[in-house]
Image (cartoon, grey):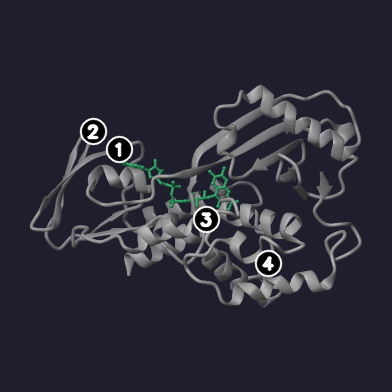
Amino acid sequence: MKRLLSNNLNLIPDSKLFDYFSILKFLYVRKKQTVHEIVGKSKIFEAFWDPLTLGVMNTSSQKASAKILSNVIKKTLLKGEKYCRIYQPKVSWNNSIIDPCIKFLKNNGCEIELRKSLKSIEIEYNHISKLCFSENTIEIDEQDSVIFAIPPTNLSKFFPYSTLPSNYNSIVNIHYNLPKKLKEKISHQIIGFVNSNAHWLFVKDDYLSVTISNANHLNNLDSNKIANIIWSEICSFMNTNHQIPDFQVVKEKKATVEQSPSNFELVKNLNGLPKNLSICGDWTQTSLPCTIEGSILSGKKAVI
Ligand SMILES: Cc1cc2nc3c(=O)[nH]c(=O)nc-3n(C[C@H](O)[C@H](O)[C@H](O)COP(=O)(O)OP(=O)(O)OC[C@H]3O[C@@H](n4cnc5c(N)ncnc54)[C@H](O)[C@@H]3O)c2cc1C
């Protein structure tokens, strides 16, 4: 296990400036190519391209669409440092995005109903005419539009004849209480790991959060085991043998769809939906990875 970036140098340890020219290969990629096909042989594959792909696309380089990563690189690395900054909410996502959004919707006359699952729909003359929830049904007038913002496997339940992405990748987060003694040993707020099970370590005031992307191999592994494996990696990084503190493991089994060329192709070819229905959600836009940004942009498109 190595720290991704050395403290004082701007280059990855053991790399040469020449190795970074592999970025140019992303200028021209074909839509069926994977990231591994483009830079699998690069000397900075393991220390840079692979962790970057996992972090951006939650998909292994062997499966991840090179076209999507190429789009990201053009919008970030190739535009300069200002476009590569990490954005994190000051307090929480609720505080930064969700609460202000709910306030805006309510102030503009929208009614929000939570915890109501759509069970079925009725379609007449290629228009959705009824939305049937567990406790009520909403009639849809001819001039009304409907927007679904649900994951592809849930959309498939209403349109079983459509072929949509059905394979997902999980993300596992492990949150540890951070003993004061250890906090003094950490000088960065975000630390990337390579050649390890842990990918990212986020250091908060009184806890540490570890993120593991593309984590389907951990879906069925006991949470205690996961927490212990990762804790031993943290100890090795911090050069300590401190006993494991209290922790919580969160497995999000359907964190994002697998962002492979074939899945993006399925989404692009999706047609035959009712005329008054638009769909949005991170997986519906086919030029960016499945992220909060992608889902917001897809929502904007759906209302135009
Ligand atoms: C652990 C984790 C870490 C992540 N980290 C980042 C990150 O650092 N940066 C980033 O940009 N992105 C991150 N992502 C990805 C990001 O969260 C997603 O891209 C984004 O939330 C997708 O939003 P969405 O609205 O498209 O879909 P979702 O957030 O999946 O929302 C879909 C909604 O549809 C609802 N639904 C489904 N079926 C029905 C039904 N039949 N009736 C009614 N409602 C239904 C679901 O309950 C859900 O609320 C992360 C994801 C996970 C899981």
> Mark 3: is the Cβ under 8 angstroms from ligand 1?
yes
Q: Decide: marks 1, 2 in contact (CB < 8 A)?
A: yes
Q: Residue at x 31, y 63 (%)?
A: 269
State the residue in front, 27 or 206: 27
Q: Identify the mark nearer the N-term, 4 or 3.
A: 4
Q: Residue at x 54, y 56 (%)?
A: 64
Q: Residue at x 35, y 64 (%)?
A: 268
Q: Identify the mark nearer the N-term, 3 or 1.
A: 1
Q: Is residue 78 left or right of residue 180?
A: left
Determine crowd level at label 4: few under 14, some 14-19, many 20+ residues with C-alpha closer than 10 A. few
Q: Decide: marks 1, 4 in contact (CB < 8 A)?
A: no
Q: Residue at x 60, y 55 (%)?
A: 61
Q: Identify the mark nearer the N-term, 1 or 2.
A: 1
Q: Decide: marks 4, 3 in contact (CB < 8 A)?
A: no
Q: Which residue is mark 4?
A: 84
Q: Which residue is mark 3?
A: 291
Q: Secondary structure at mark 3?
A: loop
Q: Identify the mark nearer the N-term, 4 or 2.
A: 4
- Amino acid marked by disc 1: Ser
Looking at the picture, how far across and down is residue 283, in whole percent?
42, 55
- Circle on res. 134: 2
State the residue in front, 166 or 32: 32
**Which of the two discs, 1 and 4, sits closer to the camera?**
4
Looking at the picture, how far across and down is residue 28, in whole percent?
56, 77
- Amino acid marked by disc 3: Thr
User: Which quadrant would the N terminus be assigned to in this image?
Assistant: top right
Q: Which residue is mark 1?
A: 117
